[in-house]
Amino acid sequence: MSNKWRPAMAWLYLATCAFDFIIAPIASAIIYAQYGQEIKPWVPLTLQGAGLYHLAMGAIVGITSWSRGQERMSELKTLSQMSRNVESETSPVTQVETTSYRVRRRTVTPPSDTDLQDADSQPRNFDPESRTVG
């Protein structure tokens, strides 16, 4: 729960807004019409008290998403500095880890002379997918 509370708050705010501005007005109009009463407009619950609920949720969701972005930027900056400081031609880095990221580098072997000769020996209109010539 300690890692997922930010998205949970955003989903909760979305569900609250969907109920208060979409579901409840439609449901109240249907109920009034079903019982033959005069349809009264729905008064959103979250707008009572000068809309303090929306201000609070906007602050919580907005500030936490901004702070998480800053955390990710600092992690990426740390990862970049680690790879620059540790890596050299004599000791290449093959794996760097932080609390959230793991980066692995694979060594690339250049093609051998026989691989290049085999590639040149293929016909011009060779289709490697169909394994046919023509």
Image (tube, helix red, strand yellow):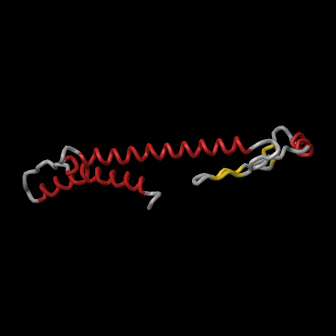
Identity of the residue drawn at 45% across and 59% down: 2
Task: In the displayed orientation, state which residue is furthest to the left.
Answer: 37
Q: Image check: 60 left or right of 26?
A: right
Residue 108 in the image, given as x and y percentages of width and height:
79, 46
Residue 32 in the image, given as x and y percentages of width and height:
12, 55
Task: In the displayed orientation, state which residue is furthest to the top.
Answer: 124
Count numbered badges in the picture. Answer: 0
Task: In the displayed orientation, state which residue is furthest to the front.
Answer: 85
Identity of the residue drawn at 19% across and 43% down: 50
Residue 13 in the image, given as x and y percentages of width and height:
33, 51
In the picture shown, does residue 18 fall above or below 125? below
Identity of the residue drawn at 32% across and 54% down: 15
Q: Nearer the viewer, residue 134 or 73?
A: 73
> Image quadrant of residue 99?
bottom right
In the picture shown, does residue 116 fall above or below 7? above
Q: Quadrant of the C terminus?
A: top right
Q: Nearer the viewer, residue 33 or 112?
A: 112
Q: Image check: 47 left or right of 62?
A: left
Q: Nearer the viewer, residue 25 or 10?
A: 10
Q: Nearer the viewer, residue 72 or 45?
A: 72
Identity of the residue drawn at 44% across and 62% down: 1
Residue 25 in the image, given as x and y percentages of width and height:
20, 51
